[in-house]
Amino acid sequence: QITLKESGPTLVKPTQTLTLTCTFSGFSLNTSGVGVGWIRQPPGKALECLALIYWNDDPRYSSSLNNRLTITKDTSKNEVVLTMTNVGAMDTGTYFCAHTRYSTSSPFDYWGQGALVTVSS
Amino acid sequence: SYDLTQPPSVSVSPGQTASITCSGDNLGNKYVCWYQKKPGQSPVLVIYQDYMRPSGIPGRFSAANSGNTATLTISGTQSLDEADYYCQAWDSRIVVFGGGTKLTVL
């Protein structure tokens, strides 16, 4: 079955770079049509899609955070890594990774448990 | 950027029907999905491709999408349906979520 799990620091200082790793099983990012996305939820706020990456290395980014984000994949490790530069208090929240497919009709059908990240000095 | 607008809150009595709307420009021309989100838990997909239910999602969840509005309907609402609900669609190259609706069952 498909599982995903997020890992990374729980506390990051302002202006630092946040690196989160999504480790998954039950599918391969070598398979045509497969993708993984990163979604976050600040406390008391809505879900926000940050970035996606597909089997063909096609990255997609939120327009509001585009210049701060990098998403990469390591198919040999079954990992997707999200890097966010110059973090601030507004980046505090729970970060989820999720499985999807290469289609505008495809939802995020499997989700990780989420990783809580706090940005504070 | 593309905006999806949801009412912040909806209240329903147990056993009654709850309807949650999601509005966006020509939303009916896009595929919409819906997620249920409870505190401390990961989102759960309850509807995809406008009205399809994933396996394991009860039949009391239904949805439609036309014009500028998509609607999630929960029939015979139960207390365990109390949660935040988010609609989602695609805009250009990225996924967009609505602002979420808190469903209260009282």
Image (spheres, coloured by chain):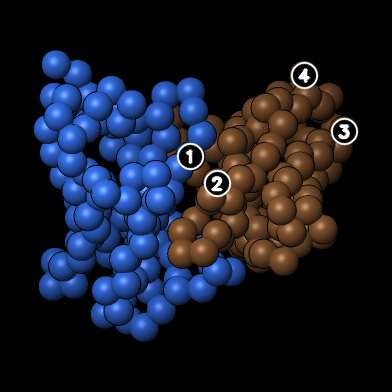
Chain colours: A blue, B brown
| Residue underneath mark 3 | B16
**Camera-nearest label, 1 or 4:** 1
Residues at marks 3 and 1 touching, judged by CB atoms closer than 8 Å? no
Mark 2 to mark 3 CA distance (whole Å)? 26 Å
Q: Is residue B64 above or below residue A93?
A: below
The residue shown at (82%, 58%) is: B67
Query: Which mark sits nearer the N-terminus, 3 or 4?
Result: 3
Residue A76 lies left or right of residue B21; in this view the side is: left
Residue under numbered circle 2? B97
Q: Label 1 sits on what residue type?
A: Leu
Provide residue B55's location: percent of width, then percent of height.
Answer: 61, 62
CA separation in Å, label 1 and label 4: 25 Å
Residue B106: mark in rendering: 4
- Please tell me whether mark 3 or mark 1 is closer to you in this view: 1
- Chain containing mark 3: B
**Label 1 belongs to which residue?**
A47
> Vertical placement of B20 versus B40: above or below?
below
